[in-house]
């Protein structure tokens, strides 16, 4: 059986096709379009240009799904549509143009599916799961028998940039505003975490993959590993946020598509590491899409 999953995120819209047999699955295609929908949100509303971007991406993916003759398809949106005030208008426009009615999942549901997907291939005894998207950040504190606490915060790498930055690379003042905003949101989380519970964090999403790739390219982290440290994250921020273009370009030339969201995403990683005492991040190859597949189609979810 072939299953197609389309994830309409705030930064990218991604299509994955999986071959599923006997409750197991393997990915056979992974394609993304950097639609940057969070950048088309004005005064809380997704603009007509943003809606058009979403529709064009979905129409392109429809052709791919037809070509693969998938048996089942799931199309869902996260903060990209969850957080806009004209949600009904957007959904109706997408349905009118493409015939698609995307499922809009709540922040709590996104966190749950994140956890299902992230721990499917990499079971952990305890720790923190972190999903930094373009428009939201999901956190799950978990122990051996599953999640203890879950939360979705309405702030992400691209939405932070849109809210606070005017320059291509956020200025020191703009970064200070971002840090203050993120820190205040994290301080309001009243979880009774013991010291050492979250030293190892499981990271998913584009920002975490970005950090790992930059750590491998710029800091010499082995490409055989999928882990970077909080210290690595600090070093990468010093490079990417540098006012010296010769220094910052080292990061931007590797991942030019992350130009707007790179520094805000790094700030989120740094502040989360400080707040929860996370010393290292394991970057999972699976996340919300795999969690959605497991939960909706394979019926093997536990939580």
Image (spheres, helix red, strand yellow):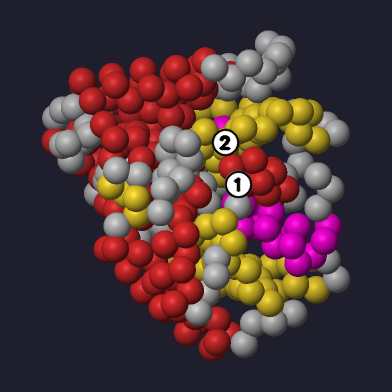
140 or 286, nearer to the observer: 140
Question: Are discs 1 and 2 less than 8 Å apart at CB?
Answer: yes
Mark 2, secondary structure of its residue: strand
Figure quadrant of the C terminus = top right
**Residue 236: image tag:** none
- Determine which residue is flagged by label 2: 152
**Quick one: 76 or 280, which is closer to the camera?**
76
Q: Position of residue 186 (x, y in %)?
A: 51, 21
Distance between mark 1 and mark 2 Cα atoms: 9 Å
Q: Position of residue 73 (x, y in %)?
A: 64, 74
First to last magenta residue range: 281-300
Residue 283, x across and y down, in percent: 57, 42
Residue depth check, mark 1 versus mark 2: number of the one nearer the observer: 1
Residue at left 69%, top 67%? 26
x 59%, y 61%: residue: 103
The structure residue drawn at horizontal position 59% and vertical position 19%, both measured from the top left corner, is 189
298, above or below 257, in the image: below
- Mark 1 is surrounded, within 10 Å at the Cα level, by few (under 14), some (14 to 19) or many (20 or more) other residues, namely some
In the image: residue 158, left or right of residue 242: right
The crowding category of the residue bearing disc 2, from other C-alpha atoms within 10 Å (few below 14, some 14 to 19, many at least 20), is many
Residue 70 seen: yes
Q: Dot 1 corresponds to which residue?
A: 106
Q: Position of residue 36 (x, y in %)?
A: 34, 55
Q: Earlier in the sequence, mark 1 or mark 2?
A: 1
């Amino acid at each position: 059986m072939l299953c197609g999953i389309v994830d309409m995120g705030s930064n990218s819209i991604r299509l994955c096709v999986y071959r599923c047999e006997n409750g197991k699955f393997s990915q056979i295609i992974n394609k993304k379009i950097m639609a940057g929908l969070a950048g088309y949100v004005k005064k809380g509303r997704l603009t007509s240009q943003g809606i058009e971007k979403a529709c064009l991406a979905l129409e392109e993916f429809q052709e791919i799904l037809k070509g693969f003759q998938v048996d089942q398809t799931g199309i869902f949106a996260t903060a990209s549509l969850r957080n806009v005030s004209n949600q009904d208008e957007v959904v109706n426009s997408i349905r009118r143009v493409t015939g698609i009615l995307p499922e809009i999942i709540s922040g709590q549901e996104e966190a749950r599916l994140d956890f299902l997907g992230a721990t499917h291939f990499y079971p952990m005894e305890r720790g923190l799961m972190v999903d930094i998207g373009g428009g939201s950040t999901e956190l799950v504190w978990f122990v051996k028998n599953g999640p203890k606490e879950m939360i979705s915060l309405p702030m992400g790498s691209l939405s932070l940039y849109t809210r606070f930055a005017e320059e291509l690379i956020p200025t020191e003042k703009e970064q200070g505003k971002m840090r203050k905003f993120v820190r205040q949101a994290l301080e309001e989380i009243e979880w009774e975490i013991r010291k050492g519970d979250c030293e190892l964090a499981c990271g998913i999403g584009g920002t975490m993959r970005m950090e790992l790739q930059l750590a491998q390219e710029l800091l010499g982290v082995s490409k055989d590993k999928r882990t970077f440290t909080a210290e690595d994250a600090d070093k990468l921020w010093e490079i990417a946020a540098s006012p010296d273009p010769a220094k910052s370009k080292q990061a931007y030339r590797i991942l030019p598509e992350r130009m707007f969201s790179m520094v805000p995403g790094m700030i989120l990683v740094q502040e989360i590491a400080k707040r929860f005492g996370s010393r290292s991040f394991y970057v999972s190859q699976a996340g919300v899409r795999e969690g959605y597949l497991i939960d909706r189609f394979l019926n093997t979810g536990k939580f």
